[in-house]
Image (cartoon, rainbow, N blue to C red):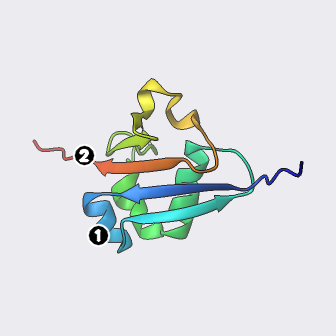
């Protein structure tokens, strides 16, 4: 049995993130298993204008600005940014609102 090492991950964006991208989802193809952290880096490379909104400038981390779900589970109950994404997984980015 021949194995295909390609990993297709659907990235869905809500709120202001969807406005920045101009669509509500992207499907990204990776050469194999990938961590969520690596996937976020790939998204920023493909859509650089997302970085300002998605990534906290001081922490260099998307978690303060965004609720991230992998297959409907919040990443804090998984392995955080080190969660391994598999073929067919769906990642949802929900921007959080900070008011002072």
Instruction: Find disc 1 in the rendering and name its residue.
Output: 19
- Residue 45 at x, y = what percent? 56, 65
- Determine whether 84 is above or below 47 in the image: above
**Viewer-side residue, 49 vs 34:** 34
Using residue 96 as the reference point, say whether residue 30 is left or right of it: right
Identify the residue shown where x is 18% and y is 44%.
98
- Residue 74 at x, y = what percent? 39, 34
Instruction: Find disc 2 in the rendering and name its residue.
Output: 96
Classify mark 2: helix, strand or loop.
loop
- Determine whether 74 is above or below 60 in the image: above
- Residue 68 at x, y = what percent? 39, 42
**Viewer-side residue, 3 vs 15:** 3
- Residue 67 at x, y = what percent? 33, 41
How packed is label 2: few (under 14 Cα within 10 Å), some, or many (20 or more)?
some
Identify the residue shown where x is 46% and y is 41%.
71
Classify mark 1: helix, strand or loop.
helix
- What quarter of the picture does the C terminus occupy? top left
- Determine whether 63 is above or below 14 in the image: above
């Amino acid at each position: 049995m021949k194995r295909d090492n390609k990993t297709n991950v659907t990235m869905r964006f809500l709120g202001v993130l969807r406005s920045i991208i101009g669509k509500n989802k992207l499907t990204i193809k990776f050469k194999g298993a990938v961590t969520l952290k690596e996937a976020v880096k790939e998204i920023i490379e493909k859509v650089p204008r997302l970085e300002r909104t998605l990534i906290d400038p001081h922490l260099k981390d998307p978690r303060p600005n965004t609720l991230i779900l992998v297959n409907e589970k919040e990443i804090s109950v998984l392995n955080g940014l080190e969660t391994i994404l598999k073929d067919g997984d769906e990642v949802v980015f929900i921007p959080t609102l900070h008011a002072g």
